Image: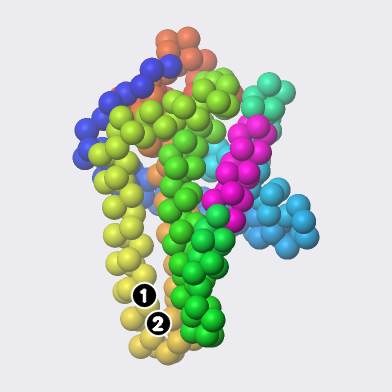
């Protein structure tokens, strides 16, 4: 396994390829993303351990959605069982994925708690200030999650398809993102633009048809579809950033081995 350095414009190629692959199996990929989010939401309502359990599932679920995209790219219909790919790759890789999940959950709780603490300490007392504090906490939480996203962006795939240890996968993921920062930034900018444009268009249409209720009826399903499209493009950022070794490429048929190497 070796790192590929790609030109910045590749970020937009990832967006385009993700969209093209999504529309090969739109119902399946949307359904799989909906299944994942439903499980996380159900876990979140469990007192005490729900949020932690949901966080621990993120790396495994990310890998499952990437595996579903790989299936769709090959013209195959991704079955729901593909979401369990991380749990069917042998005990060693399962343990590594669970370690990743524990690290992610701890990091996410730390980032969210720190954001809440900082925003709460500066929150004004009026009711309007409470809304402002909530926005500040959300913004800070997202900011504090950015380093977590960088180190985890490729980590689940490296653990699952390349057998890299959890700590090394976090390091290699960060190196891949930073060495290909231009491509990842254009990838993010492309998706942010799509979300804003689609949200604005459908928001206006919803308001014209049914007011505030129409906006909600339009935007919520749109958000699910756009999030499914986005998740369908993450696989290509990994595929193009890492080159499989010859022996890995030869064993591509094995679901525990890496998909087609980057070009």
User: Which disc, if any, is residue 202?
Assistant: 1
Q: Are marks 2 and 1 in contact (CB under 8 Å)?
A: yes
Numbered tag placed on residue 2 in the rendering? none
Q: Residue at x 29, y 52 (%)?
A: 189
Q: Is residue 15 placed above or below 251 in the rendered structure?
A: below
Numbered tag placed on residue 206 in the rendering: 2
User: Mark 2 Cα within 10 Å, few/some/many (few <14, many 20+)?
Assistant: some
Name the foreground residue: 213 vs 117: 117
Q: Residue at x 30, y 33 (%)?
A: 180
Magenta segment: does it hold 109?
A: yes
Give how far across and how far down residue 47 sits, in percent. 78, 60
Crowding at dot 1, Cα within 10 Å, few <14 / some 14-19 / many 20+, comes out as some
Q: Position of residue 32 (x, y in %)?
A: 58, 51
SS for callout 2: helix
- The picture places residue 149, in percent across and down from the top left corner, at 46, 43
In which quadrant of the rendered image does the C terminus lie?
top left
> 198 above or below 69?
below
Q: Residue at x 51, y 26 (%)?
A: 169
User: What residue lies at 70% left-to-right and 48% top-to-bottom?
Assistant: 53
Q: What stretch of residues is rendered in magenta?
A: 97-113
Residue 240 visible here: no
75 left or right of 83? left
The residue closer to the viewer here, 236 or 78, is 236
């Amino acid at each position: 396994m070796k790192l590929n350095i790609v030109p910045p414009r590749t970020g937009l190629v990832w967006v385009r390829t993700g969209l093209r692959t999504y529309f090969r199996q739109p119902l399946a990929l949307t359904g799989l993303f909906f299944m994942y989010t439903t499980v996380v939401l159900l876990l979140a309502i469990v007192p005490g351990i729900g949020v932690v359990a949901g966080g621990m599932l993120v790396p495994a679920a990310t890998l499952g959605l990437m595996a579903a995209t790989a299936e769709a790219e090959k013209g195959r219909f991704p079955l729901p069982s593909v979401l369990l790919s991380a749990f069917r790759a042998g005990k060693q890789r399962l343990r590594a994925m669970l370690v990743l999940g524990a690290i992610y959950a701890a990091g996410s709780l730390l980032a969210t708690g720190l954001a809440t603490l900082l925003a709460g300490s500066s929150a004004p007392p009026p009711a309007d200030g409470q809304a402002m504090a909530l926005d500040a906490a959300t913004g800070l939480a997202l900011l504090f999650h950015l380093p977590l996203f960088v180190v985890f962006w490729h980590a689940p795939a490296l653990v699952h398809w390349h057998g890299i240890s959890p700590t090394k996968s976090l390091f290699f993921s960060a190196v891949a993102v930073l060495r290909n920062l231009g491509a990842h930034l254009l990838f993010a900018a492309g998706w942010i633009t799509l979300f804003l444009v689609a949200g604005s268009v459908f928001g206006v249409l919803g308001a014209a048809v049914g007011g505030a209720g129409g906006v909600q009826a339009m935007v919520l399903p749109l958000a699910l579809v756009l999030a499914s499209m986005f998740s369908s493009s993450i696989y290509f950022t990994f595929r193009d950033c890492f080159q499989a070794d010859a022996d890995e490429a030869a064993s591509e048929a094995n679901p525990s081995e890496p998909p087609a190497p980057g070009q």
